[in-house]
Every structure is written in structure tokens, then in C-alpha cells.
Amino acid sequence: MSHSSKPAQSAGAPSSQADAGDRIPDWDPWSPESKADPYAVQADLRERCPFPFTDRLGGFTAITRYADIVQAVHDTQHFRNGLAPKLGRPMPPLETDPPLHTVYRRLLQPFFNVPRMRTIEHQLRAFTVDLLESLLPRGRADFAESFTFILPVRAFCFLLNLPDTDWPQIKEWSRDAYTVYAHVPEYKERFAASNAALYAYSHALLEERRRYPRDPTEDMTTLLSQSSIDGVPIDDDTIVGAIRLLLTAGHESTNSGLANCILYLALHPESQAHLRANPAAIPVAVEEMLRWDTPIMAMPRVVAKDVELGGHQFKAGESVYLHYSSGNRDAQKFPDADSCVLDRKPNAHLVFGQGIHTCMGAPLARIEIKLALEELLARTSSFALDGEVGRTIFHRRGVTSLPLRFERRESLS
């Protein structure tokens, strides 16, 4: 890996986007090297260049070490979420800061808490079994296209009280919405069209809930449409932004996390056999598989005012990415960090972030992956790769294809 002769990571170096054009990039998260083995690249960066600069996405600096990431996550005065929304107006709660963030989080959190998950677990398991029973008789399938892409979006449609028949279209739009990161010119039109369609769908959903409101304790859109902040009703554009965020972020990361877990088990038959024989160990194992192969590699922040962190001087206006996948492999935090230790405890990983922006949907993701692995392992005697795995691009770490061959358990034949 080449590094700039101009040490952009040193304290006092110019860091703002305004002078990013004068800086020599330290890395390229979209390079073939980074895509092939991002963890080796990240290990090198942590050791030699812990605050690497890239000129991609207008230029940003990555924070790669666990301790530095945690400090930045909790320093919401300097590292902010609401200063540079990606698509114009902020999409709450993710693209907001306190005190607004606190309000939106308090409104929406009950829809994702553990008690709510228990009430929908039966339906999530039914979706899982339905998908698996359509696949297992075949003996082989692309588990990305036929399972991991489908289960999370069906689950989220159920949570949002959307028609189950809408999931294929929402999934297609969501896929295209992430092509904005691909740096391929022809994807720009696909992104623009699908992003517009997601906003139109969100507007239509809000209008429908205004005409025919549902129980606000059971329906997020109805709740938002009836809520006020400091006595002022939440405006339609903000509600639509929140729905638009949920329609993509609500299932894409779970899709990647589930696929990564299944891929790990397909490559490690001994771990697969262990969890098949010990299903009670699945929840702890899921936490470790997600740490080992983190589905959302990094999340953005904007520096609100000059600050020093880990010996690096950040300047106001600078774009920063908190590199969770790198922090999750930091040996200063995790003994034997590059090994997947299925019974690792404690496991203070960064998969779902930390602090006020800890992933609101983490309980949903955890229960979906747990149920999926329980049913997959119970209904098979083995599964293994049956072709080449396709990988997603930064900032996601998932799969585009996951060909498997599998043996169905005789008792379930």
C-alpha cells in the first residue's frame, strides 16, 4: 500500500474539505485491494496511518482505531451527524443532533425495543420458514437473491404495516439507492430514479395514513403524523425523510449482516456443526461473526469545530468516517482480533455503533439473524459454498451473490 509523502495524518496538518485538493490521498476504500481484503488494509492503516485521508466522496478522513472511534462517537459537540445531510434535508433520527435527535429517538425507539420484538417474533419466524422451505428442496441456491435479500425487507414491511407485496419494489429501489457510492457514471441515473421513487412512496404512505390513521402505538407513520415538537407539528418533509431513511437503512444492513454470518458458517463447517448441536450458543456467536465481518464498515460525521483526537488535529467542516470495521479488528481492544471466537465474552464491538446514535434497529437485526440461523441450521445437515461470492462496495460489507449447496435434514424431508 502506498502512502502520501505528505503526512496528512500528523497533528496540525490541514484537514478541511476546502484544502482537500492539496492533499495526497493515503488510501482508496474502493480500490481492488480494499475490496479483496479490507481488513488487511485496515490493519496497515491502524499501524502506520491511523487517520488516513481519501479524496473520494469529496474528501474525508477515516478514524481507524477503536479507542479513537469510541471517543469521537461520544463527543457529539465536535463530531456531528446533522451538519451535512446526504440528500438535502436531514433524515431523522440519524441525520440530526441533540436536542432534535433526542425527540425523534424517543418517538421511534418503542417500535424497535426488545418487548416489541417479542410480539413480532412469531411472524418473523414464519417468514424465515416460508423462504427456507421454498429453497431447501432444490439442494442449491443463491442465498443472497433467494434469502438474505428478502427476509429483512419483508420483516421491515411488516414492522411498518406495509403490504407484503410491496417488498420486491422496495428492495429494488433500496439496492439502487446505494449505487451512489459506486463511482460508476451509469449508476447515477439509477440512483436518481430510485431515490425519487422512494421519496414518492414515502409521501404516498404519509398521505394515506393521514386519511386513514392507524393506532399510533402500532404504526410509526401515524405516530409521526400526529406528533409535535415544542407544540409545532412535525412538517411533512421531515416525516417523509424519516420514512425514506427507514425504507432503506431498516433492512439493508441486516441483509449484509445475515449474509456475512451464513458465509462464515459455510466456510467453517466445524462452527456450523457446533451451532447446529448447540443452538443456545447462536446469539453470542452472531455478535462475534458480526464483529469479525462488520456489515456497515463506516459511518460519517462532520467536524463542528476544531478538535484534537488521538494526536490528530481535525478542523471545522472536515468530513470524517468512523471506521467501525477497523475498530472491530483492533487488537488493542480485542485479543486475537483477527480470529472469529464464537463464544467471545465480553464483546464490546462497534457493529451497531455506540452512544446516542447506536443503531435503533439493532434488536430487530439481532432477532432476524438469530431466527434465520436457528431455522437454517435446524433444517439442514450441512451447507457449503457452491461458487464465487460477490461482494458489495464500501461503505457496506455484504454480498451480492452467495451460492450455496445444502443437504436438508432427513427428518424434515
Image (spheres, rainbow, N blue to C red):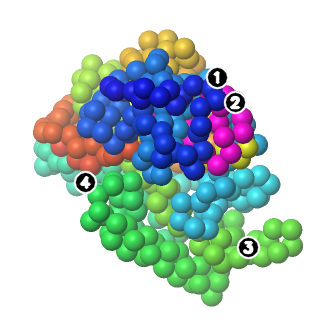
Q: Nearer the viewer, mark 2 or mark 3?
A: 2
The residues tagged by marks 2 and 4 sit, at their Cα atoms, a distance apart of: 45 Å
CB of mark 1 within 8 Å of CB of mark 4? Answer: no
- In this picture, residue 338 sits left or right of residue 245: left
Question: Which is more toward the observer, 265 or 294?
Answer: 294
Whether residue 172 is visible = no
Q: Which mark is residue 234?
A: 3
Residue pictured at 65% horizontal, 71% vertical: 238
From the image, tell me which residue sits under label 1.
311
Residue 315 quadrant:
top right
Tag of residue 145: 4
From which residue to which does the magenta span run? 306-326
| Dot placed on the residue nearer the N-terminal end, 1 or 4 | 4
Cα–Cα gap, marks 1 and 3: 42 Å
In the structure shown, which secondary structural element does the residue marked by tag 1 occupy? loop
Mark 1 and mark 2 in contact? Answer it, CB < 8 Å: yes
Measuring from the top left, give residue 77's x and y in whole percent: 76, 43
Viewer-side label of 4, 3: 3
Measured Cα–Cα span from mark 4 to mark 3: 38 Å
Residue marked by disc 2: 308
The answer to whether 83 appears left or right of 172 in the picture is right
Q: Which residue type carries mark 4?
A: Glu
| Residue farthest along the right direction in this orientation | 231
CA distance separating discs 1 and 4: 45 Å
